[in-house]
Image (cartoon, helix red, strand yellow):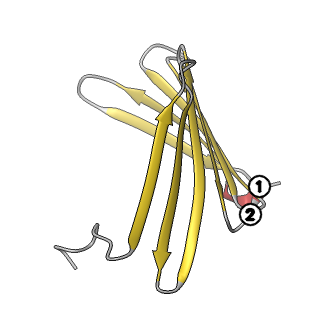
Amino acid sequence: DLLTRDYTYDQKLSVSTVSSSGVAVTSTAVKKGGLYSLDVASAYKYKNNLVDVKVDTESNISTTLTVLDVLPSTKLVTSIKFPDYNAGKVEVQYFHDHATFAAAVGMKP
């Protein structure tokens, strides 16, 4: 398991592109056994903000909003998954030369 933990034996195809406006789109198909799993992910960065959206064939939508430097040396990450609203969280990270602090809170409706 130590040598093969991050290795997959499944068949996988990924296609990625980046538009002139900076939107990155990646489509991935994975064949596990006899079943196919497909997803489309997009990422857009504007100034200090990064938005990631991923949709898969199981009707799951996951979104992540990352805001850099809300305060100096901090990062705010908010994520939520649909239709499972309980999977969301808000995380604040503080970076220093010698230490990093992080706090995360799960969201419940």
Residue, x 56% and y 81% (percent of image)? 35
Q: Position of residue 53 (x, y in %)?
A: 63, 43
Residue, x 46% and y 13% (percent of image)? 72
Residue, x 54% and y 13% (percent of image)? 47
Q: Residue furthest left?
A: 3
The three-letter amino acid code for the residue at tag 2 is Ser
Q: Are marks 1 and 2 in contact (CB under 8 Å)?
A: no
Q: Position of residue 55 (x, y in %)?
A: 66, 54
| Mark 1 crowd level (few <14, some 14–19, many ≥20, 10 Å Cα) | few
Question: Which residue, given by chain and number where applicable, does mark 1 sit on?
Answer: 108
Q: Secondary structure at mark 1?
A: loop
The numbered mark at residue 59 is 2
Earlier sequence position, callout 1 versus callout 2: 2
| Mark 2 crowd level (few <14, some 14–19, many ≥20, 10 Å Cα) | few
The image quarter containing residue 51 is top right
Q: Residue furthest right?
A: 109
Left or right of 39, for residue 59: right
Left or right of 106, for residue 70: left
Left or right of 106, for residue 102: left
